[in-house]
Image (cartoon, rainbow, N blue to C red):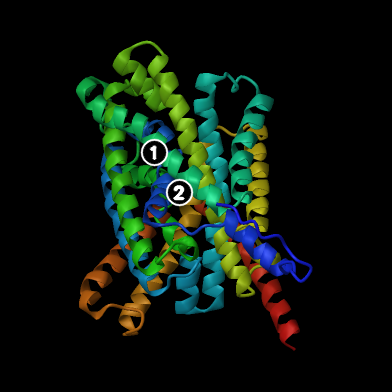
Amino acid sequence: MTSTITPTATTTAAPPAQDAAVEQNKHARRFGLPVATALVMGNIIGGGIFLLPASVAPFGTISLVAFGVLTLGAIALALVFGRLAEKHPQTGGPYVYAREAFGDFAGFLAAWSYWITTWVSNAALAVAAVGYLDVLIPVQGSVAATITAALVLQWLPALANLAGTRYVGAVQLIATVLKFAPLLLVAVGGLFFFDTANLGPFQASDSSPLGAISASAAILLFSYLGVESAAVSAGEVRDPRRNVGRATILGTLGAALIYLLGTLSVFGTVAHDKLVGSTAPFSDAVNAMFGGSWGGTAVACAALVSMVGALNGWTLLSAQTPYAAAKDGLFPAVFATKRRGVPVVGVLVTVVLASLLTVYNYTAGSEGVFEILVLVTTFTATVPYLLSTAAQIYFLASGQSARVNRRRLVRDGVLAVLAFGFSMWLVAGSGYAAVYQGVLFLFAGVLVYAWMSARRVRVAA
């Protein structure tokens, strides 16, 4: 029922700050457990699963062993992030943990490296999405059309982020639901069409078994990037001490189950020789299962929805860590600017850098663009993972009662050590080229830290 009372001359307008707060609340909304879980699953199950079966096929079916080991490592990482989030429920995730344990420089390295991971991941996701878009609209015959498609796929999620966290959460939930249909179709349905003749050799590369497992695991790590999503956005989650850990574990376990079944089904339904050169392996799997091209087209549509959803979530994460660091004076202050619940400068800078990297990789004529980008993010992602697990080990070993649960001391310690060793193994499997490029990205940040530290000293003086 509407009110019949009219304003009088004594009625005063709401102050500008209050108006801004109302506008902020209209577009900013905290995430509950379902949306936080969808954020984790949506970022984990992004573009990786839809393209990675073809990326690891050259190693042979030994890569399935790597997937199993990787899953155990990802679950250990998820449990560690869940424990850390219980004691440190602030936006920033690995940045917060590293800074609390080891000081500003370690926190900066975690933030800088994680930020690199997010925008390079966005470029890789866009490349993967173009491969599925090509199933619907042939674009890969032209470099200009390919670049345009990749840029559009990056900027649409960025615009959704700039609209506010309310819309980010809605897009994430819808995209996560829509992507499950084709994944479950292949993961479960593919088992009924499984043919061992399609598997190819157990080890197809010239490297040793351990080397093949490590190398394929380094590529496959990209498919598990995102286990920290809820922790990074803890400040946007309702009751973060409780919901961040739950969302992290539930999202990782759900993604792991779909990953393992889906990859196994693709290996068993698509002939190995064809899978090695495939740009849309899940579409090829559905076509092999049912014949024709309708199934592949449907999967391509769902894959695009999934990847756009992942880009939506990763774009949000790409701005959250710089935002947390900027509030502490470790990133330029402009990154702390928030509108509608979103750090807008972080979103814009990230999408611009990802766009430039995409254009460079396509115009440089690099072969295996997706694999190159994936391996770079593999290395940069391990830096905040290593610092986070080391922070947990530090908290446990130093006996800080406010930061640890004494009843779970031994179990948490074992998990932290396993997660740390797992992250070190991934660095070794990234390869010399990826570590070389990743270190250059990382060391470039040292100059930024020196400049920001000097600026803080001048201001304090």
Q: Amino acid at mark 1?
A: Val
The residue at which mark 1 appears reads as 177
Left or right position of 329 against 413: right
* Residue 438 visible: no
Q: Which mark is residue 59?
A: none
Residue shown at 70% from the left, 80% from the top: 456
Q: Residue 342 appears at what percent x and percent y?
A: 60, 57
Q: Residue 91 appears at what percent x and percent y?
A: 50, 66
Q: Residue 75 appears at what percent x and percent y?
A: 29, 55
Residue 4 occupies quadrant? bottom right
Pick the residue in front: 41 or 264. Answer: 41
Which corner quadrant holds the C terminus?
Answer: bottom right
Q: Residue 35 appears at what percent x and percent y?
A: 42, 51
The residue at which mark 2 appears reads as 431
Q: Amino acid at mark 2?
A: Gly
The answer to whether the residues at label 2 and label 1 have Cβ atoms under 8 Å apart is: no
Residue 191 occupies quadrant? top left
The label nearer to you, 2 versus 1, is: 1
Question: For the image shown, how many numbered marks are present on the structure?
Answer: 2
Residue shown at 45% from the left, 37% from the top: 306
Q: What is the distance, in whole Å, between disc 2 and disc 1 at their CAs?
A: 35 Å
Left or right position of 173 against 72: right
Pick the residue in front: 333 or 145. Answer: 333
SS state under label 2: loop
Pick the residue in front: 30 or 352. Answer: 30
Residue shown at 41% from the left, 47% from the top: 44
